[in-house]
Amino acid sequence: MSLLSTIRNRFDTALRQLTSDTAPMLELIRPVQDPRFGDFQANCAMSLSRHLSLPPREVAARIVAGLRIDDLCETPEIAGPGFINLRLRDSYIASRMTAIAGDERLGVEPTERPRHVVVDFSSPNVAKPMHVGHLRSTVIGDAICRTLKFAGHRVTSDNHVGDWGTQFGMIIYGYRHFVNPAAWQDDPVGELARLYKLVNQLSDYHDNLARYPGLAEAVNTAEQQLQRLQHNPDPDPGKAQKLASQARRQRESAAEALAAAESVIDSVRSRTELLALAESHPAIARLARDETARLHGGDTGNQNLWNEFLPACLSALQRIYDRLGVRFDITLGESYYNGMLPEVVESLKRQELATISEGAVCVFVDGNKAPFMIQKSDGAFTYATTDLATIRYRTETLQAAEILYVVDKRQSEHFQLLFRTAQKWGYDRLQLQHVSFGTVMGKDGKPYKTRAGDTVGLESLIDEAISRARVIVDENDDRRDVPLLSPTERARVAEIVGIGGIKYADLHHNRDSDYVFDWDRMLATTGDTAAYMQYAYARICGIFRRLSLDRRSFRAGDPVLITGPEERALALQLLQFDFAIDSVLSDYRPHLLTAWLFETADKFSKFYDRCSVQDAESAELRRSRLILCDFMARALHTGLALLGIETAEVM
C-alpha cells in the first residue's frame, strides 16, 4: 500500500466517527508544499465543520483524538483554522525505504481496479509530412499511455490518421494535372505534399479573388461610417466615443481581411507560372471536391491512386515514430470507418436524435447554437460521423471503458458536441475526455515557424535537436582526461539527449498552456530539462562504476539509515513516486511527473553534496547511501521512461 494510502486509511477510521462519507475528506490529505508544516497535511476539518456545525479546530481535535498513527508519525499538530500537520518518524521512513529498496516498481502497486482505456493521439494527415504541430499530441499521448500501463491499466493506443476526405481529393486532382514524375519517383511524400499545397494555394487564390470586391467594399463602408461619426458625432460624448471606437474596430477588421486576401492574391500573381496555372484551372476547388466525392463513391481510378499513395505516406510517418520511440497498438484511419457511416446516420435518425436542417442531417445539442452536422446537404459525411462510428467501434468491438482524445484545445467545441451526442445515442456509461493542449510558440509569441514562415517539419526538428546535442556531448566527453565514449556511442547519446530534450521541453509545461520553443533552454544541462536528469542518472551510474560495484547488489537486504536532513528529504521524496503517478493520471497531466523528477533530482543533489557516499563514517552507512543512490537512479530511469525519454549510463 502506498504511503499516502496508508495515512488515509488511518484517517478513515477516525473520520468514520464523525461522518459516513469519508471519501471526499480523505482526498484532502496530501503532501505539504512547505516542509515547515511537516510532511503531510489534512485539511478535512474545515469541510467537516460546516456539516457538524462545530468550529474547525474542535473538529480537528476530534479527528486527532480518534487517530491511531503513532507508529507512523510524531504527535499530530493542529495549526491555523484547523489544519492537521503530520511529520513522519525517521524510523518509519527508513523501514519503508528498506522494504521497497529491491522493488523494481519502486513501491508502486498496480491498481486494484484496472480499466480498458483507448488513447487516441497524434493522428496526422497522412499525405503531408509531420510538423511541429503534431509534436504535442504525440508526446503527451505517448506519456499518458506509458503511465496508464505502468499503473496496471489495459491500454490501446490508436493513431486515428487522416487517410480519407477532402485532402485526398485535392491530391488526386493535383496528381492528375501537376505531378512531376521525377519528383514522385524520388520522394513520393514530398511530391504529394507539394501537390496538396499547390492545389490549396490555387483554390485560395480563386476564393480570395471572388471575395475581394466585397472585402474592399466593406473597408470603404467602414471608412465612410467612421467619417460620418466624426463629422456628426452623437450629442452624448460617451456614446459618441463608443460609436467611434466600434467604427474604428470595424474598419481595422475589414482592412485586415482585405490585406490578407491581397497577400494570397499577390502570392500567385507575383509568380508567372503560378498565375498561368490559376488561370488554367478557374474551378479547381470544385473539381477537387468532385475528386473527393468520386473517391468516396468507389471510383476505381481514384481508389487505385489512393492505394498507391497510402503505403509511402504511412511509411514516412512510421519513420518519424521510430525515431521518437512511439508505438501504437492499432492504426485505424478515417478510411477504416467509411463503410460504417451510413448506419451511424440511420441509427441517429431512428432514435430521432438527428433532424434535417437546410438539407443537412444534424444533431442539435441543448445549449449550443451550432448543430452537430453528421451529413452534408450533398450527401457527404463529416468528421463528426467518423468520430461517432469510432466511438461505436471502440466500445462494442474493443470493449473500451474510457476513451481519451489528445487533441489541441481549438477542437474543444467539437468534442463537447461529440460527447453529448454519444451520450444521447446510448453511450452514457462510457467515459470520454478531451485531453486538450496549447500551441508550440516561437520567441516572437506566434506559432513556431521557420524563418521563411513555413511550419517547422518534425523530422528536421529532430535532426537539429540531435545535431545540437552532439555538440554538448562532444564538449563534455572531451573535457575528460580520457574520453569515455566512442564516436558511435557519442552519436547514440546525442540522439538520446536531443530527442529527450524535445519531449521534456513539451511535457514539463502544463498541457493547457502554450509554450515558447527555446533551443538553449531545452538542451541545458542545468535546470528543469531532460539533459539535467539524464546527466544526473549517468553520474549516479558513474559512482558505482568508479567503485567497481554492481548496482543490483544494493536492492535488498540491508537497512536504509536516516542520519541527517538530506537523507530524510531524499528518502521521503522517493517514497512519493506513487503519488506522482496518481497525480498524472487524475487528469492526465504529465507535467506533474516532470515536477516530481526535478524536485527529486534537486533533493538528490543536496544529499550528494552534503552526505559523503564513498567516505561515509561506517560501512553500514556507506551501503545505506549506495542503496539511496541506486533507488534514485532507478527513479530517474523509470520516471523518464514513462515520459518516453531514454537514459544512458555514460554520457
Image: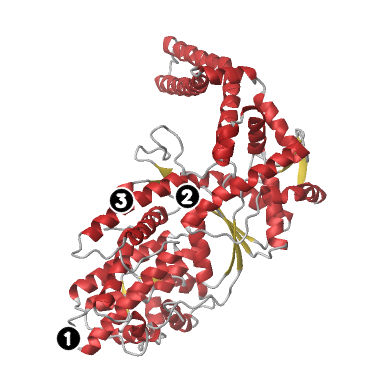
Q: Secondary structure at mark 1?
A: loop
Instruction: Please tell me the numbered disc located at residue 521.
Output: 3
| Label 2, residues with CA under 10 Å away: few <14, some 14-19, many ≥20 | many
| Identity of the residue drawn at 65% across and 25% down | 284
| Label 1, residues with CA under 10 Å away: few <14, some 14-19, many ≥20 | few
Image quadrant for the C terminus? bottom left
Q: Is residue 405 above or below residue 111?
A: above
Q: Position of residue 175 (x, y in %)?
A: 64, 32
Residue type at tag 3: Arg
**Pointer 2 residue:** 135
In the foreground, 525 or 152: 525
| Identity of the residue drawn at 40% across and 65% down | 640
In the foreground, 88 or 47: 88
- Is residue 83 visible in the rendered image? The answer is no
Q: Is residue 440 left or right of residue 393?
A: left
Q: Look at the numbered discs 1 and 2 and tell me whether their residues touch, using CB distance below 8 Å.
A: no
| Label 3, residues with CA under 10 Å away: few <14, some 14-19, many ≥20 | some
Q: Is residue 250 above or below residue 168?
A: above
Tell me how far mark 2 sits from mark 3, CA to CA: 18 Å
